[in-house]
Amino acid sequence: PSVLMAPTRVITTPLVDGFGGPAWNVMQRRTTILFDRETVSHSGDGPQIPGRKSQGPLSKLGQELSDRVGNTPYPGHLVLVGHSMGTILASELLRRFPALQVDDIVFMAAACSIRDIADSIIPYLADPAHQQTRFYNLVLHPEAETRESHAVHIAPEGSLLVWLDQLLDKPDAMPDRTAGRYVNLGLNARYLDQAVRRVDGSLWARIFIKVFPYAAHGEKGQPMQHGDFGAFSFWEESFWDPSTAGPYSRYPVRPAAVRSGR
């Protein structure tokens, strides 16, 4: 079916490119106002006048969580899970509220950029207050990413992350590509390694990247599409564990590991 619908995708791909980009920009704007809202004032019948910025709901939540489970002893186990665009919010939350004590950070099919990981997650892990925190980045098999189909193969093939990198966002710099794609992690291996070593090379012991296997015939048991993660028990550690249900125990992000084939 994919081959038969190829002529149709010649038409639909430019449409997604043309209309999808502005829609993505609107979605990014909506994530921003979850943290910062700009009030406006009216002067009679004149134009609206921008006012001061106010806290958005996620800023208020972050402050409340930071106050409650920050540096004070907390008997529970706090896990921060983000999927797709949720990882953009999660990384920004930790950047703004570094006192928030999270035990495990779990990103699934992350739409945030590699640069977000370097600028937000890695500094958070390096903070002496978070010496036990672990970061898990869960990604689809690269073949599953590129072969995902939409609208009976009429729309361009590829997951949302593929669309972001190639159609909707089209970042100029390699580190600005999505962090939830296997291929982007490989292309940015040295960039990530340098980001870690600048603060503390030992952080690699607490960074795990899990790649789910590819089921050529659609066998169940692991996510195969961008939206599949919600169908699994993503709140359980067994789902994040790189040694479970995957051909790679850990993605070889470090250049030395890439050379040795580990």
Image (spheres, rainbow, N blue to C red):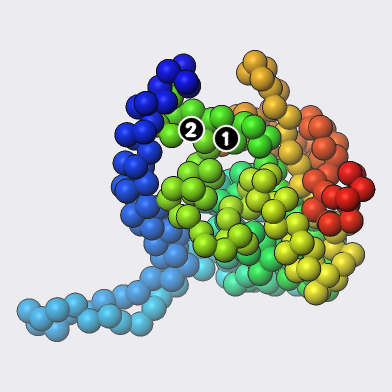
**Residue pictured at 47% horizontal, 67% vertical:** 35
Q: Is residue 170 visible?
A: yes
Q: Position of residue 206 (x, y in %)?
A: 84, 56
Q: Position of residue 28 (x, y in %)?
A: 43, 58
Image position of 130 (left or right of 79) = right
Quadrant of the image occupied by residue 144: top right
Q: CA distance from mark 1 to mark 2?
A: 7 Å
In this view of the protein, which residue sits in the foreground, 10 or 62?
10
In the picture, the disc for residue 157 is 2
Q: Position of residue 75 (x, y in %)?
A: 79, 57
Pointers 1 and 2 in contact (CB under 8 A)?
yes
Q: Amino acid at mark 1?
A: Thr
**Residue pictured at 68% horizontal, 22% vertical:** 215
**Residue pictured at 49% horizontal, 48% vertical:** 166
Residue lying furthest left: 45
Q: Position of residue 179 (x, y in %)?
A: 63, 53
- Whether residue 75 is situated above or below residue 143 in the rendered picture: below
Image position of 172 (left or right of 95) = left
Mark 1 lies on a secondary structure that is helix
Mark 2 lies on a secondary structure that is loop
On the rendered image, what quadrant is the C terminus found in? top right
| First-in-chain label (1 vs 2) | 1
Image position of 190 (left or right of 230) = right
In the picture, the disc for residue 146 is 1
